[in-house]
């Protein structure tokens, strides 16, 4: 894969080399959040799945690698990331199964049909502009900070895109769980499964994984906590190691 002019690339491999993903060295880079979310649910082969804010395409790539029957779509606002995602998909041989669309999730009505998808997933921007450490690059800032979209915009888009009974799966900071659940409910999405992610046993919850259903009832299945590491400073937990297993 050749470099984007003026942007140095690094290439990482997952699943013992079954999947490669190139990223801008100084731009937005995917994190464990995306790996966790793609292992939070089991898709049905017939589901039409959309990734809102796909970045370099990492979540569609992981899903396509793990589930050979799936066809996926990724939506991304930033042109350089759109180009990078398409190049990653081509390099991994998934051009027939993954489509990347350029566009703003705040205007999904101009891109997709209402109720076009059975499943929507997203690792949305989560840092408020007024607080937290600001990223240095514009690509990083747009991916991490609520510059172009906040959780309300993501929930609104998911509610419009999903057919009745469709599901939205999201990863979000645990400290902002109330905002996440409130935004989902305001747009007709009721949380049905929830799992708190901790760095290690005894540590505070850092992330939360949520599955919401359009038009669902209020019953919520709270899963056992997920630990990334066996203990502070130790190796991955067995559960986290399975997320990276080939």
Image: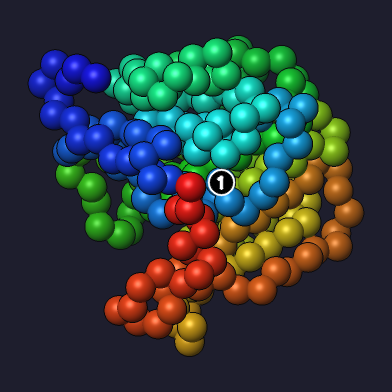
Binning the other alpha carbons within 10 Å of mark 1 as few (below 14), some (14 to 19) or many (20 upward) gives many
Q: Which of the 4 image quarters holds residue 154?
A: top right
| Closer to us: 17 or 8 | 17
x and y percentages locating residue 97 in the rendered image: 57, 19
- Quarter-of-image position of residue 115: top right
For mark 1, what is the residue?
Answer: 38
Percent position (x, y) of residue 182? 67, 55
Q: Is residue 123 visible?
A: yes
Query: Residue 207, can we see it?
Result: no
Q: In the displayed image of the protein, which residue is found farthest to the bottom?
A: 202
Q: Residue at x 74, y 31 (%)?
A: 45
Q: Residue at x 37, y 50 (%)?
A: 31
- What residue is at 78 percent from the left and 45 percent from the top? 213
Decide: is 105 above or below 111: below
Q: Secondary structure at mark 1?
A: helix
Vertical placement of 93 versus 29: above or below? above
Camera-side residue: 182 or 94? 94
Q: Quadrant of the N terminus?
A: top left
Picture layout, residue 196 above or below residue 58: below
Towards the viewer: 199 or 12: 12
Residue 94 image point, x, y percent = 49, 20
Q: Residue at x 36, y 39 (%)?
A: 17
Residue 179: x %, y % from top left: 59, 57
């Amino acid at each position: 894969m050749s470099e984007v002019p003026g942007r140095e690339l690094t290439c990482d491999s997952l699943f013992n080399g079954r999947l490669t993903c190139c990223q801008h060295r100084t731009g937005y880079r995917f994190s464990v959040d995306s790996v966790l979310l793609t292992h939070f649910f089991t898709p049905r082969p017939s589901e039409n799945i959309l990734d809102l804010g796909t970045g370099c395409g990492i979540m569609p790539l992981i899903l396509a690698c793990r589930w050979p029957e799936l066809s996926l779509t990724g939506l991304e606002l930033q042109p350089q990331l759109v180009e990078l995602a398409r190049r990653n998909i081509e390099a991994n041989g998934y051009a027939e199964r993954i489509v990347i669309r350029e566009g703003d999730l705040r205007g999904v009505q101009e891109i997709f049909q209402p109720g076009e998808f059975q499943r929507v997933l997203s690792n949305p921007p989560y840092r408020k502009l007024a607080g937290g450490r600001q990223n240095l690059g514009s690509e990083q800032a747009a991916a991490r900070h609520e510059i172009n979209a906040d959780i309300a915009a993501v929930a609104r888009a998911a509610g419009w895109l999903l057919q009745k009974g469709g599901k939205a799966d999201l990863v979000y900071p645990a400290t902002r769980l109330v905002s996440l659940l409130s935004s989902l409910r305001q747009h007709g999405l009721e949380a049905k499964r929830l799992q708190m992610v901790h760095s290690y046993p005894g540590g505070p919850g850092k992330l939360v994984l949520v599955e919401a259903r359009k038009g669902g009832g209020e019953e919520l299945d709270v899963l056992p906590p997920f630990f990334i590491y066996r203990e502070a400073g130790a190796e991955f937990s067995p559960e986290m190691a399975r997320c990276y297993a080939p």
